Image (cartoon, rainbow, N blue to C red):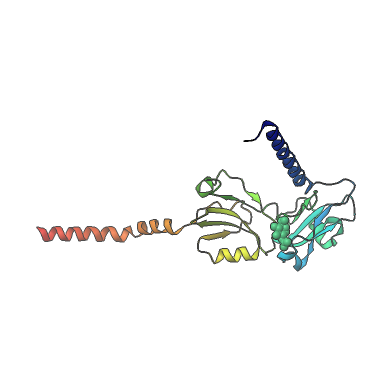
Amino acid sequence: MFSSANKSTIYGILLLLSLVWCNVKADDNSVDPATPRTCYSCEGINCLRVTKVNETTVCTDLLDYCVTVFRGFTVVARGCYGDLQSSYRDKCDLNDHPECMKCFGNRCNDKGRADFKCIECKSSEDKKCATETSAMTAVQCPVPTAQNSYCFVRESADEGTIRGCFVHQRDQEECLSDTKCSMCLSDDAEACNSYKVLTAETAGVSGVFSNMNVIAPTVILTVLASLVRSI
Ligand SMILES: *[C@@H]1O[C@H](CO)[C@@H](O)[C@H](O)[C@H]1NC(C)=O
C-alpha cells in the first residue's frame, strides 16, 4: 500500500513522536539545577479538599525539597520543607518518621505514607489478580484527601476483580455502599487487600454447601421413608 520511502517517513514520524512523548514524561518530575523545585502544597483543612489537590508552590531556596506531613494517615501539610511552619517540619527532622515523606523531584510529593501500600491490579489485565495475589508487590498509594487511606477489592460482572487504593472520601463511601466492594485499613501490615471477596456466584455455591447439614439428613430421611413404605 505504501512505497518504502513513505514507510520510512511514517516510521520516522512515529519514532519522533515517541521520543517527544518520552521527553515530556521525563520532564514531569526532573529538576533543573538552576531553578528551585516546585512542590504540591496545602495546609490544614485544605489538604482534605479534592479540588485543591493539584495546587503547587515554588520553593524559595534552590536546595529545598518537597515534603508531605501526616498526622496518623491524614495529610496536614504539603510543600517545600524550608517554607513550612516548624511545627509541621518537626517530624521531617526525625530520621525516617512514617508521618513525613520527603522527595527530591519536581511535584514529587503526590504519594501517601511510604509504609502504606496496597496491591493494585485488574483481573482483566492480569488473571492472577483474582486469586494468586501472594506473588504481587504492593504499591504506595496516591496522596489521600480523606482522613484515612484504604486498600480495596471490588468484584464486578463486566470488570472482574479490581484491587487498589481508595484515598478520596467519595470512592470510600461508594465502596461502603457497594455489596461487592470491600475495604481494609493496613496499619502495619502491607497489602491488606490480598483476600478474596464473596460474590453472588460464589456466595450461591457456598450457601448450598453450608445448607448441606440440613439438606442431607432430610434427603436421607425422605428416601428411607419411601423405602419403608415400599416394603
Ligand atoms: C489533578 O491532576 C490529576 C493528574 O493530572 C488529574 O487527573 C486530576 O483530575 C486533577 N484534579 C483536579 C481537581 O484538578
Q: Nearer the viewer, residue 162 or 80?
A: 162
169 w.r.t. 154: above or below: below
For the question of whether residue 128 can be seen, the reply is yes
- Most extreme residue toward the top, as rendered? 4
Kindly identify the residue that appears in the image at 70 percent across and 38 percent down.
10
Please state the horizontal and vertical placement of residue 103, each as a whole percent of the image.
Answer: 78, 50
Determine whether, in the image, residue 191 is placed left or right of residue 204: right
Quarter of the rendering occupied by the C terminus: bottom left
Residue drawn at point x = 76 percent, y = 57 percent: 68
Q: Which of 9 and 150 lies nearest the eye of the viewer?
A: 9
Q: Which residue is found at the position 38% from the left and 59% from the top?
A: 207
Furthest-left residue in this view: 231
Does residue 210 appear to the left or right of 220 in the view shown? Answer: right
Q: Quadrant of ligand 1?
A: bottom right
> Where's the N terminus, which quadrant?
top right
Residue 96 appears at what percent x and percent y? 75, 50
**x, y percent for residue 180:** 50, 60
Q: Nearer the viewer, residue 202 or 186?
A: 202
| Residue 1 falls left or right of residue 202 | right
Q: How many marks?
A: 0
Q: Position of residue 2 (x, y in %)?
A: 65, 35
Residue 100's image quarter? bottom right
Q: Is residue 72 visible?
A: no
Decide: is 213 above or below 7. below
Q: Quadrant of residue 88?
A: bottom right
